[in-house]
Amino acid sequence: MKNNLVLKIVIGALIVAIAGLAVKLAITKPTLQTNVAETTTTVTILPTTVTLAATKTIEECDKIKEQYSKDMCYTNVAKVRLDLSICDKIKDQNQKAMCYSGVAVTKLDLSVCDKLQIQGYKDLCYRYVGPAKQDSSICDRIPNQTSGQFPNSVKNSCYDAVALATQDLSICKRIQNNLAQPDILSCYIQIAVKKQDLSICTQLQAQSDKDMCYKEIGVVQNDLLICDKIQNQSIKYLCYSYVAYNKRDLSICNQLPVSYAYEHPKDFCYGNMVSVMKDISICDQIQDQYIKDSCYISIAISTKNSSLCAKAIDQSRVDECYKLLKSN
């Protein structure tokens, strides 16, 4: 039990470490550009570009006394030089596995993943290399997990990322439905948005799923006509609000009702607009007092104008507004 807990902790740390190199690996293979003078490698992994700077040489790493710092130094240099022999200098086995995985992701080299002895690290290595190589068969290498809070979460995530990279809906269907995200619906919607293809939304069976799909595409395209396809009024109004925000168009907010069920669509839209327009007169148009107070406080903090805090009615929130401004 203790070993399993330790493994879960170190795998969690690996996710963070590798994510720095391979967040949303997709579409094209990485290109490496090395500037020898600055000892800097730029790794382009669409849509994220990561610059890795070798601030230390191996010799400098050798001189570091504190072991953790030394191991991190070796890891950073290894990622830049794509050299596993540098990873082998690391004492801590968990950190060594992170180093190997980072090199594997950068090089898109499955053989590096296969060298990892701990299955959890190997699985995560496959998860990131698979989408980068646009190859779902790499996800197949990840064994099924039937236990834990989120069974098959790493494998599902791999399929989802490959499906998005290749825009292949059939790969979405290989995701096993459970509590882990992303699920099949999320996979479909991501591809629909990426392709800007409303026909994918119509393939979804539940109307609520279609509505969410239309919302995502409507917001990306800033198209109210797509928002109008949404049957659920709450989601439709949310779509309008986001389009208004994107277009900086207050007139769109004016098309929304003051209230719907327990919601305040127009006030919510006005509140969003204030964050980009910095116009306090917009706050004056808000009817719900809590949202109005939030609006005044938001402008007060963003403009560092403490006098605006007093326009809020809730004294506890006024005091908090003053406190935040004073601390900044």
Image (cartoon, rainbow, N blue to C red):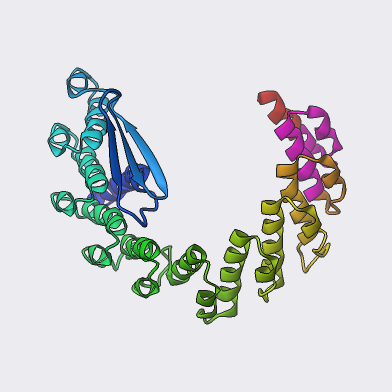
Q: Nearer the viewer, residue 262 or 188?
A: 188
Residue 111 in the image: x percent, y percent?
14, 52
Q: Position of residue 117 (x, y in %)?
A: 14, 50
Q: Which residues are magenta?
A: 291-319
- Taking the image as shown, residue 79 lies to the left or right of residue 264, namely left
Q: Is residue 172 left or right of residue 303?
A: left
Q: Is residue 125 visible?
A: yes
Q: Which residue is drawn at the image coordinates 50% and 75% (left, top)?
A: 200
Residue 312 in the magenta stretch? The answer is: yes
Query: Which image quarter: residue 240?
Result: bottom right
Q: From the image, give the main secondary structure of the stretch colored magenta.
A: helix
Residue at the (59%, 59%) spot, across then down: 220
- On whether residue 247 falls in the magenta region, the answer is no
Task: Judge whether 266 appears above or below 293 on screen.
Answer: below
Q: Position of residue 283 (x, y in %)?
A: 83, 45
Query: Residue 307's x, y, as percent?
Result: 83, 29
- How many numbered marks does the figure carry? 0
